[in-house]
Image (spheres, rainbow, N blue to C red):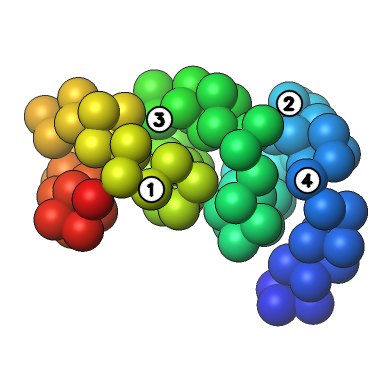
Amino acid sequence: LAAVMQALAGFGCAGALIDILNDPSIKYRGKVVAIRAIANLRCTEALPRMVSLLEGNHIPVVLAAVDAVFRIAGRNAADLLAPLRDHGDRDVREAVCRRLEHA
C-alpha cells in the first residue's frame, strides 16, 4: 500500500488522482488510496471533490475525505466539516470532532 501511495504521489496534483475518484471501475480501497495521496500532496484543486465525497455512503471513503479536507483546507476546514458532527456514523462523527479540535 505504501508503494502505491508513493507512485500516486508521483503524479503530483494532476487530474489523474481526481480521475481515479470518478472512475467506477476503481474499488473503494483504491479511492481511499487516491484520497490519501491527494491529502498528502495538499492538492487545493481537489478540495471541491473532497468536500463532495463527505456526502458519500462508503464510510472509509468519507473518513479519508474528512482527513483530506482537514489537511488541504487547514483552519478553513471547520466550516466544511462542521455539518458532519451529526453524521449517522459514529466513526465519522468522532473523526470530525478530532479534526475540529485542531482547526
Q: Mark 1: give few (<14), some (14-19) or many (20+) Cα within 10 Å.
A: some
* Residue highlighted by disc 4: 13
* Residue highlighted by disc 1: 74
Q: Are marks 1 and 2 in contact (CB under 8 Å)?
A: no
The alpha-carbon separation of the residues under discs 3 and 1 comes to 16 Å
Q: Amino acid at mark 1?
A: Gly
Residue extending furthest front? 75
* Residue highlighted by disc 2: 22
As helix, strand or loop, the secondary structure at mark 1 comes to helix
The alpha-carbon separation of the residues under discs 2 and 4 comes to 15 Å
Q: Are marks 2 and 3 in contact (CB under 8 Å)?
A: no
Q: Mark 2: give few (<14), some (14-19) or many (20+) Cα within 10 Å.
A: few
Q: Nearer the viewer, mark 4 or mark 3?
A: 4
Q: Are marks 2 and 4 in contact (CB under 8 Å)?
A: no
Q: Nearer the viewer, mark 3 or mark 1?
A: 1
In this view, the residue in front, 93 or 88, is 93
Which numbered circle lies on residue 45? none
* Residue highlighted by disc 3: 54
The relative height of residue 80 versus residue 99 in the rendered view (above or below) is above
Return the x and y of residue 22 as percentages of the image width and height: 73, 26
As helix, strand or loop, the secondary structure at mark 4 comes to loop
Q: Earlier in the sequence, mark 1 or mark 4?
A: 4
The alpha-carbon separation of the residues under discs 4 and 3 comes to 20 Å
Q: Residue placed at 73% from the left, 67% from the top?
A: 5
The alpha-carbon separation of the residues under discs 1 and 4 comes to 17 Å
The relative height of residue 76 versus residue 75 in the rendered view (above or below) is above
